Amino acid sequence: MKTTGIGTSHAKIILIGEHSVVYGQPAIALPLPEVKLTVTITKLDSEQQLLDSRYFSGSITEAPENMLGIKTLILALINQFDGQSDGWKMNITSMLPAERGMGSSAASAIAIIRAFFDYYDRQLSRETLLKLADIEEKITHRSPSGLDAATTSAINPIWFVKGHAGQHLAMNVTGTLVIADSGVKGQTGDAIKAVKEQLLSNKEATVGQIETLGNLAKETKTCLQNGNSNNLGIILSRAQTQLKLLNVSHPSVDNLIQVAMDNQALGAKLTGGGRGGCIIALVKDAATAQSLSVKLIDAGATATWIQPLQGGNNDTNVC
Ligand SMILES: C[C@@](O)(CCO)CC(=O)[O-]
């Protein structure tokens, strides 16, 4: 065992395929490596196991109900390493807004697992990493596809189908994404439940919406390879139409999407679980992204990020 263990991860955005990915359709997601989360475990002389995060500081056993997924994961890791009487303090620092569809819970799980394996000086395979992250994601999001954990731990854009390893997706499209936070907490777990209920109450239409989203993800893959950003924008907006029909959008999200479309966006949609959270809007270049970002903030967005799709400066700019 070392005296310090460190694990890192980052935010993600889903370009296309949220919700439908839970039902076996493909999705495409992008890591945002500049929006970082770090977990540090520091050895203590006592047998205390303490957590220090923006939501809770104290003994891990006293973590609040909304941290049940994280707490269960940590207890599973303690068992895995027979570390019941090892004392440490775990510090979580995060640039990710929580509950905004940017993968905050999965990113926390990934960095915690990496920090534990570093602390106990053990090798960690990608398969084990994702399997362990699922302990947290299952509790936090009910039936997760695994997409969030796969992307918050990946360095490249991924093409993802539930039950399979994500595949690196080459991008050949110019254009810039503006990500904007509606300021309203997303409710991924509730949104997943709502889609599940609609599948029971209105099966035919809901299956149709899920399949359409899957087909749009396939069209997106072609667009990313052919480099057609105009078509990509149209596809993103078509996906938003389906997500609205699935009842996972929110007035605050719809409002920001409208502002984006009125200000030169080629297309826009919610990203992540929905019912609040963030939108993504595709624009043709960095200058348009900057001016749209200002417009979105004026319209009530609480934060924006700018992410070029390909070429040039690949850093995410936080606005
Ligand atoms: C809504 C969803 O598709 C994405 C949440 O970021 C759920 C999942 O894939 O686990």
Image: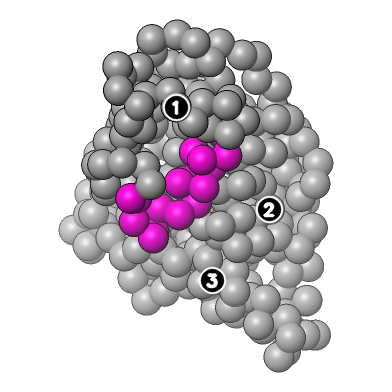
Question: 63 or 67, which lies in front?
Answer: 63
Question: 209 or 164, which lies in front?
Answer: 164
Q: Which residue is mark 1?
A: 85
* Residue visible at 66% across and 61% down in the picture: 143
- Place residue 54 in its image quadrant: top left
The residue carrying mark 3 has its beta carbon less than 8 Å from ligand 1:
yes
Q: In terms of secondary structure, where does tag 2 sit?
A: loop
- Image spot of residue 97 (x, y percent): 33, 47
Q: Main secondary structure of the magenta part?
A: helix
Q: What residue type is disc 3 on?
A: Ala
- Image spot of residue 19 (x, y percent): 64, 63
Q: Which mark is residue 191?
A: 3
Instruction: Tell me, yes or no, whether the highlighted magenta stretch contains residue 66.
Output: yes
Q: In terms of secondary structure, where does tag 3 sit?
A: helix
> Label 1, label 3: how many angstroms apart (C-alpha)?
39 Å
- Image spot of residue 308 (x, y percent): 46, 33
Res 92 seen here: no
Query: Considering the image in quadrants, where does the C terminus appear?
Result: top left
Q: What residue type is disc 1 on?
A: Ser
| Sequence order check, earlier mark of 3 and 2 | 2
Residue density around tag 2, few if under 14, some if 14–19, many if 20 or more, within 10 Å: many
| Sequence order check, earlier mark of 1 and 3 | 1
**Count of numbered circles on the image:** 3
Q: Which residue is mark 2?
A: 145
Question: 232 or 158, which lies in front?
Answer: 158
Q: Which residues are magenta?
A: 62-77
Q: In terms of secondary structure, where does tag 1 sit?
A: loop
